[in-house]
Image (cartoon, rainbow, N blue to C red):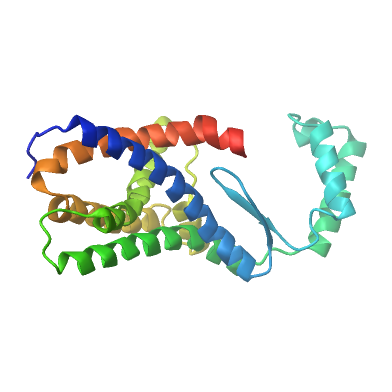
């Protein structure tokens, strides 16, 4: 049940919190990937909305540097349109790189899993805080209670991912994401992992909103969450993230 009480001061505070936690959730998700990659001994680089990993010594390798140089020199050109001599250069350095460096497919699978796993671990931590605090039957949520709420809502990412995936499917764009890659690695339907994680995430969100958030605050909380999440995404991915990284 939702009552349409609106509290402007709380609305503004909630929006700021949702913007902040959108950024925190994005970066911590990538750190989940990085933690697994580091465990397997890869070097990593963090960007504002992604990470890359490669074997030790990869970036310093002469063939990798040559490959990057060729990419820069012929950026935007199709391989088939290049001169035969340039194609041969590409083929040679790629063959040399593949000989020296090997990406383990199982490692790749675990690294892809690391992001969603971190998201759910954080969400479950939030639920643990909520369950512990609710045992005291407090009528008014304290700071620790709100922290539990925001951490539990990290699972919203899974709902967001499948929503954007459906939009991309409808509009004919390529569907990307950890869940898609995991499904493909496991030879499952592309959507299976996305659906499972989205259902779990949605269940957590419904529980938090209708069992934890006080009735009189629900409308303000939901509205600020919707707007704050969108603003957080736009601010981070369209401006601040690019500026910092």
Q: Quadrant of the C terminus?
A: top right
Please tell me whether residue 167 is drawn above or below residue 201 in the rendered image: above
Pick the residue in front: 184 or 16: 16
Please tell me whether residue 70 is drawn above or below residue 94 in the rendered image: above
Residue 105 visible in this rendered orientation of the protein: no
Please tell me whether residue 228 is drawn above or below residue 36 in the rendered image: above
* Quarter of the view holding residue 201: bottom left
Pick the residue in front: 173 or 6: 6
Quick check: 96 left or right of 133?
A: right
Q: Position of residue 180 (x, y in %)?
A: 46, 52
Q: Position of residue 106 (x, y in %)?
A: 59, 69
Residue 238 visible in this rendered orientation of the protein: yes
Quick check: 133 left or right of 36?
A: left
Please tell me whether residue 117 is drawn above or below residue 158 in the rendered image: below
Q: Position of residue 121 (x, y in %)?
A: 39, 64
* Quarter of the view holding residue 218: top left
Q: Residue furthest right?
A: 85
Q: Residue at x 26, y 52 (%)?
A: 202
């Amino acid at each position: 049940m939702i009552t349409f009480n609106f509290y402007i001061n709380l609305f503004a505070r909630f929006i700021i919190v949702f913007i902040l936690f959108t950024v925190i959730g994005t970066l911590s998700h990538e750190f989940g990937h990085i933690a697994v990659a580091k465990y397997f001994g890869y070097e990593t680089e963090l960007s504002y909305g992604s990470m890359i990993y490669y074997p030790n010594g990869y970036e310093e390798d002469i063939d990798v540097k040559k490959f990057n140089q060729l990419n820069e020199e012929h950026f935007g050109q199709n391989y088939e349109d290049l001169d035969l001599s340039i194609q041969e250069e590409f083929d040679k350095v790629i063959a040399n790189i593949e000989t020296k460096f090997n990406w383990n497919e199982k490692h790749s699978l675990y690294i892809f899993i690391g992001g969603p796993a971190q998201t759910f671990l954080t969400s479950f931590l939030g639920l643990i805080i909520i369950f512990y605090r609710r045992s005291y039957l407090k009528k008014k949520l304290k700071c620790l209670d709100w922290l539990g709420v925001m951490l539990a809502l990290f699972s919203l990412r899974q709902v967001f991912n499948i929503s954007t995936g459906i939009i991309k499917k409808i509009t004919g764009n390529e569907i990307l994401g950890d869940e898609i890659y995991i499904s493909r690695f496991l030879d499952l339907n592309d959507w299976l992992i996305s659906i499972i994680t989205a259902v779990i995430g949605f269940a957590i969100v419904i529980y938090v909103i209708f069992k934890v958030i006080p009735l009189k605050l629900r409308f303000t909380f939901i509205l600020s969450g919707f707007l704050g999440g969108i603003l957080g995404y736009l601010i981070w991915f369209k401006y601040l993230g690019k500026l910092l990284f």
